[in-house]
């Protein structure tokens, strides 16, 4: 009920504390199945300091607007472009919707269709529904990458774009983006790469010597990339990223905002009023950690994943879905539903879907947490 009179600050905070008691927190080490993490202290500081900035009205916050542009430019650089066009947005969902929107608006297809892997994130279902774009699902190979031949067979005159995934939600698999890029160029269809998760992992993992396919703008068929700073980028939610190769994609989704206090602008994002603080935190984290800083975070996460996968294989009744590509390890078990229930009862933040449990080695996940989890899993397997 909407209260008649306000309460004191202490009372409000006490009530909040009570009500959030059941929440799992990242610093507890119990959340193993999330792609988010406890943000970096600098990012928290920046968000607090600049909490009032609104990038929806850039004429008012000219400095913040310029910082967002620089953040986009640094992300584009990381992804192999000297200059890119895009925005820091609310997350991977908004970024994917913007890419599909750009492809649709630039196409003259009568009944627009988008070809995407069966492993694609559900945000594309929202995009398809909102934008009136039919989703055409392409089959996966045995290693869970998209079957490029099947993608080719599904191309029609109505195809507005192809999607490839660099770090799938369930398994962290990277599609054969070089082959998809060639296909896209052959048929003159734009390719969108969903690297919401992989964008802040793959460049660093490759630099560490991991053998992962190319996935970014170095491949000419790639016209847009989703990359989320609020996943492995250590920035507080909400912070997603959409980067386009050319200005025309951004222009194709821009509408005139005529009434703003800072003056008229063309606005491409789904959200109007949007947090400048988080864009500034993206900029700050990239400046602070640099390539070497992120590489260090990714090194730990990758090494932990390989160790964890090895330990899982030793537990009877546990089956690794595939060797990890990035810092995600997924496994199935006999009696999966019961195992999931038991692990949840023991306080673990995990979930089973598509027939397996996904563990994401985010920066808050340490070896001791995983050792405790393995003990619980072993006990559960023995009991059930
Ligand atoms: C590959 C991929 N794309 C897009 C998304 C959607 O991102 P968000 O939840 O930030 O909207 C996710 C989320 O997990 C994802 O894994």
Image (cartoon, rainbow, N blue to C red):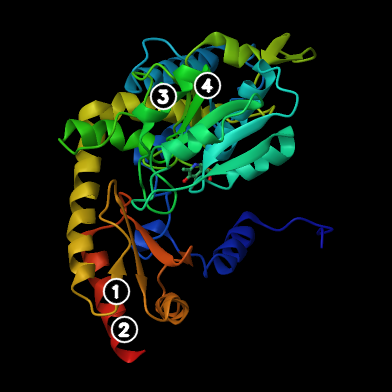
Image vertical order of residue 32 relative to residue 132, above or below: below
Does label 2 or label 4 sit earlier along the sequence? 4
Q: To which residue does mark 4 refer? A: 190
Residue corresponding to mark 3: 181
- How far apart are labels 1 and 2 at the CA level? 8 Å
State the CA–CA distance, disc 4 to disc 3. Answer: 9 Å
Q: Note whether ligand 1 is within 8 Å of mark 2.
A: no
Q: Which residue is mark 2?
A: 381
Towards the viewer: 248 or 322? 322
The percent position of residue 348, horizontal first and vertical second, equals: 40, 70
Crowdedness near tag 1: few (<14), some (14–19) or many (≥20) residues, C-alpha within 10 Å: some
Q: Nearer the viewer, mark 3 or mark 2?
A: 3
Q: Nearer the viewer, mark 1 or mark 2?
A: 1
- Label 2 sits on a secondary structure element that is helix
Q: Is residue 240 visible?
A: no
Q: Are marks 1 and 2 in contact (CB under 8 Å)?
A: yes
* Residue underneath mark 1: 318
Q: Nearer the viewer, mark 2 or mark 4?
A: 4
Q: Residues within 10 Å of mark 3 (few under 14, many from 20)?
A: many
Which residue is at 69% across, 11% downward?
Answer: 265
Identify the residue at image location x=29%, y=74%: 318
Distance of label 4 from label 1 (alpha carbons): 41 Å
Element marked by disc 1: strand
- Locate the C terminus and report the quarter of the image it occupies: bottom left
First reached walking from the N terminus: tag 1 or tag 2: 1
In this view, which residue lies farthest toward the bottom? 383
As drawn, which residue projects farthest toward the right?
Answer: 4
């Amino acid at each position: 009920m909407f209260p008649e009179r306000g309460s004191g600050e202490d009372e409000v905070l006490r009530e909040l504390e009570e009500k959030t008691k059941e929440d799992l927190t990242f610093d507890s080490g119990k959340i193993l199945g999330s792609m988010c993490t406890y943000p970096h202290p600098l990012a928290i500081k920046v968000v607090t300091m600049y909490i009032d900035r609104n990038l929806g009205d850039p004429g008012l916050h000219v400095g913040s607007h310029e910082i967002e542009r620089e953040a986009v430019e640094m992300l584009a650089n990381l992804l192999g472009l000297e200059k890119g066009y895009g925005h820091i947005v609310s997350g991977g969902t908004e970024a994917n919707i913007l890419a599909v929107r750009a492809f649709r608006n630039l196409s003259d297809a009568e009944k627009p269709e988008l070809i995407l892997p069966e492993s694609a994130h559900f945000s594309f279902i929202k995009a398809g529904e909102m934008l009136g774009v039919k989703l055409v699902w392409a089959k996966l190979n045995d290693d869970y990458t998209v079957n490029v031949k099947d993608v080719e067979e599904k191309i029609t005159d109505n195809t507005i774009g192809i999607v490839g995934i660099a770090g799938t939600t369930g398994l962290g698999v990277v599609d054969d983006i070089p082959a998809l890029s060639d296909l896209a160029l052959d048929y003159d269809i734009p390719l969108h790469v969903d690297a919401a998760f992989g964008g802040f992992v793959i460049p660093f993992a490759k630099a560490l010597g991991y053998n992962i396919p190319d996935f970014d703008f170095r491949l000419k068929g790639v016209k847009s990339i989703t990359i989320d700073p609020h996943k492995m980028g250590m920035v507080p939610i909400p912070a997603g990223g959409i980067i386009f190769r050319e200005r025309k994609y951004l222009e194709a989704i821009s509408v005139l905002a005529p009434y703003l206090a800072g003056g008229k602008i063309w606005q491409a994002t789904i959200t109007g009023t949007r947090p400048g603080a988080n864009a500034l935190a993206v900029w700050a984290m990239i400046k602070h950690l640099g390539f070497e800083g992120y590489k260090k975070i990714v090194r730990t996460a990758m090494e932990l994943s390989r160790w964890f996968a090895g330990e899982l294989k030793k537990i009877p009744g546990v089956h690794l879905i595939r060797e990890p590509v990035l810092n995600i390890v997924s496994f199935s078990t006999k009696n999966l539903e019961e195992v999931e229930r038991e692990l949840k009862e023991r306080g673990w933040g995990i979930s089973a879907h598509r027939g397996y449990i996904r563990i994401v080695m985010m920066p808050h996940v340490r070896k001791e947490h995983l050792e405790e989890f393995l003990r619980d899993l072993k006990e559960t397997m023995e009991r059930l």
